[in-house]
Amino acid sequence: MDAKSKWIDQIHRYLQGEMDAAEEAHFQQSCQQDPQIEEWLEEERQFVYILKNGFHRQWIHEQFSSLNRMVTKRSAYPGSRLVKTSKEWLAHIAVAATVALLVSLVAFWSFNQLYIRPNKMGYVDLRRAIDNIQRSQDALMNDIHHKRPTNPGTYGGTGFLISENGYLVTNYHVVQRADSIYVQDNKGNAYKAELVFQDPHVDLAVLKIMDSSFCMNKSLPYKLSPAEAPLGEQVFTLGYPKDEIVYGEGYISSETGYRDDSTAYQLSIPVNPGNSGGPLFDSRGRIIGIISGKQGESDRIAFAIKASYLKAILDSLPHDFNKRHLLYSRSSTSYRQSSRENRVAQLQQLKDYVMMVKVYN
């Protein structure tokens, strides 16, 4: 396989908008460092432009110009009959029109296969667009006393507490380029939060609730699973694809994620925009992953970052973090049964620790 073949898949994904923020930044850096990759990218971009704008137009014009020259040349011969030439002219028009139609259909099919259809089956992150109007931070600072903002936000996702003193985890793509961040619990209480740690390559971020009014007197009702979950493991999640918490259940359908990504699981579980950053629990109530995206328009093919990568982040936090209170502390508890009655009681406790993340930019 030549060098271009190795890069062409990434170039297609970049042009189709399938890359997450970390992949896109890495790809752009590669283009800056290697002019050859930049040249291939430009070739593909031009190819897409030609397909979009109908490359067959020039071909059709050339065909009709050729026919016109042929008719003019034939009519110049002595004894040529105008009627016969007209019939031939109409026949050539019909053939040219048919060929032009076929070329158009082929062009549309090629563009659809290469650049439209893959988008429908590609990776889609699950950040929820609350309002597409971009807002400045100054317009949002009318809540001086850190009360719940009346502005609904620009984007929304989910986060979950990893300590009793207000640290929580979400996806990096949820809070990327945020001017300000609020988190809201299932009772409607909103708190100002700040981004204190991020890892774009793993797509995880740590937030800290800054409001002094926040208080969580109970220990966390969950902990990180010490091992990767097996194929077929029954799982469930809590998240905010709408303005109230939503429960979903399913199972692990593959031990690798999108395009065989070893850092993630593939799940058969219903998720929607807004679920990004939500916890993925196993049947015992242990956190085994963080919901991050889904496959195209599919309703039940989702992906979750494995909990081992979250643990690595927690282990690498700066020394000024109070690590005694973090998620993997011994005080954390988990359920050891998976009956339906127990699950209902379990959810009543868990939902107090899963929050909506509101991003303003």
Image (cartoon, helix red, strand yellow):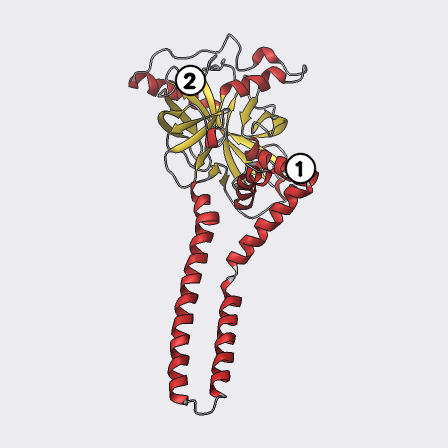
Q: Which comes before the other along the chain, label 2 or label 1? A: 1
As rendered, which of 147 and 153 lies closer to the eye?
153
Whole-percent x, y for residue 316 in the image = 63, 17
Q: Is residue 286 above or below residue 156?
A: above
User: Callout 2, which amino acid?
Assistant: Ala
Residue position for label 2:
229
**Left or right: where 74 falls relative to 312:** left
* Kind of element beneath mark 2: loop
Q: Give the position of the C terminus as an image quadrant.
A: top right
Image position, residue 105 (x, y; %): 41, 59
Q: Residue 97, percent across and down?
A: 41, 70
**Residue 178 in view:** no
Q: Which residue was labeled with disc 1?
A: 29
Nearest to the observer: residue 314 or residue 76: 76
37 left or right of 268 in image: right
Give the vertical position of 238 relative to 333 (above or below). Answer: below
- Using the rendered image of the protein, determine whether residue 32 is visible from the camera's viewpoint: yes
Q: Residue at x 39, y 80 (%)?
A: 88
Q: Amino acid at mark 1?
A: Gln
Quadrant position of residue 229: top left
